[in-house]
Image (cartoon, coloured by chain):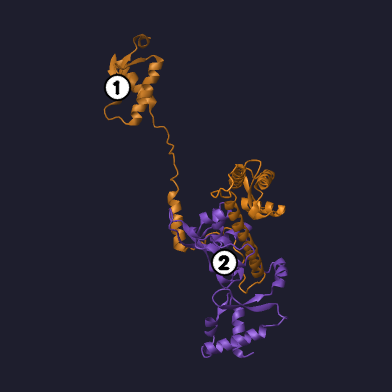
Amino acid sequence: MSAPVQDHGGFVVELEQFSGPLDLLLHLIREDEVDITDLPIARIADQFLAAIADLGLNQAADYLEMAARLLRIKAQLLLPRHLGDDEWEDPRSELVRRLLEYQQIRELVDWLHHAAGQRADRFGRGFEQPAPDLPPPPLEIGLNDLLAAAERVIALIPEPVLHRVVPRPLDVEGATARITALLAERQEFGWVDVVGAGAGVVDVLSAFIALLELAKRGSCRLHQPEPFAPMMIRREPARAAA
Amino acid sequence: MSPLAQLLEAALFAASRPLSLDELATLDPEAGEAGTRAALAELRAAWAGKGDHGVELAEAEIGDGWQFLTRPEYAETIERAQFALRPRRLSPAALETLAIIAYRQPVGRVEVDEIRGVDSEAVIEKLLERGLVEVASRGEGLGRPLLYGTTPQFLEILGLKGLEELPRLDELSVALHPPAPAEDQE
């Protein structure tokens, strides 16, 4: 029989002992040998609470609900009622009805268990291994499907990112020579004079690095009047003289 | 035994499932149904009452078939030797749920939960997986809940030929009738 049981970590596991609160209740009633239709609610409620605490079931919702129900019935029975009150309905009646119904189901369970056991003892000709709990879904696939599936998977593989490592084509030395020549020639000149109109990226970079290097050495001074304005290159007078 | 009875015996031995009279009749078209029936009776007589066989000729649960079944007293030993395995036993939770579905079908999960006093979703799911219950119809109520019923497989594992072979509720020691419509309650 199974019932959720609280582990220490708050993890609810199925315990093969009681299949539910009604089962536990029925068990207690049978142990006490009390009349189910005239249930001593106070006693049974106390026993139920003690049992679920013992079994660690006192955090399982189904059991808690039953415990609450028992306590409510117990309280209702304690309320004073007027003699000859025809309206009064036994608060236990609903629970008793459910218990009887459940008892009937348990009786059927025994019958089914017995019947299934008897049949299981007789093997037929076509013995097949009993199916495992979760049979893997049947895989029916043709070669073409398989190939198509493989192709789809391959298509999903991202292209490897290749970096082409190229020898640095920057000609910083050439640019330096060119700028030095310009500096010797003119006091001041523009960026365009250094690289020319149709310069490629490599030329621009080479020229820029050369300019920075020359500026660092103090051969020239770089000047940009305003953001995005063309850069002006001016001979550094002191050093140039030196 | 007549040659036809022997043929039926061989066919029943060879088949991996129970064979019905109609199916057996196809073995020898000339014999016809009557001839096959007579041969089957002969075969049954040959196997009946013989305590010296390990197998028996038994009526199948479904489809009016016939099959050879081993005698129950050998199940234990055969299983221990792992030549055949008995089907997994159903848990009490599964049997409770099956009992409720068998007697109340078509029945929804809410009613099963109510009678059992616990949530039965997982149990019903397992029974569906094992093919013991199926979705029979949908209810009228809110959300049109799924209603479950038992399958031929259910009868088979119990060795029953029909639901009518289940015990009648008024035969039980706790004789309770299914909840009658409200006006019947006293």
Instruction: Tell me the amino acid under the disc marked 1.
Output: Phe
Q: Are marks 1 and 2 in contact (CB under 8 Å)?
A: no
In the depicted structure, whether residue B34 falls above or below residue A188: below
In the depicted structure, whether residue A134 falls above or below residue A199: below
**On-image quarter of the C terminus of chain A:** top left
Quadrant of the rendered structure where residue A37 is?
Answer: bottom right
Q: Chain of mark 1?
A: A
Q: Nearer the viewer, residue A15 or A136?
A: A15
Residue under label 1, please give it: A228
* Mark 1 closeness class: few <14, some 14–19, many ≥20 residues within 10 Å: few
> Do the residues indicated by labels 1 and 2 lie within the same chain of the protein?
no
Q: Chain of mark 2?
A: B
**On-image quarter of the N terminus of chain A:** bottom right
The colour of chain A is: orange
Percent position of residue A152, x then y: 43, 54
Residue under label 2, please give it: B154
Quote the CA–CA distance across marks 1 and 2: 86 Å
* Mark 2 closeness class: few <14, some 14–19, many ≥20 residues within 10 Å: many
Q: At numbered mark 2, what does the secondary structure look like: helix, strand or loop?
A: helix
Quadrant of the rendered structure where residue B35 is?
Answer: bottom right
Spot the residue most to the front. A84
Q: Tell me the tag on residue B94.
A: none
- The structure residue drawn at horizontal position 65% and vertical position 53%, both measured from the top left corner, is A38
Quadrant of the rendered structure where residue A161 is?
Answer: top left
Q: Nearer the viewer, residue B13 or A215?
A: B13
- The structure residue drawn at horizontal position 63% and vertical position 85%, both measured from the top left corner, is B43
Percent position of residue A7, x then y: 65, 43
In the depicted structure, whether residue B181 falls above or below residue A214: below
Q: At numbered mark 1, what does the secondary structure look like: helix, strand or loop?
A: loop
Q: Nearer the viewer, residue B131 or A210?
A: B131
In the image, the chain rendered in purple is: B
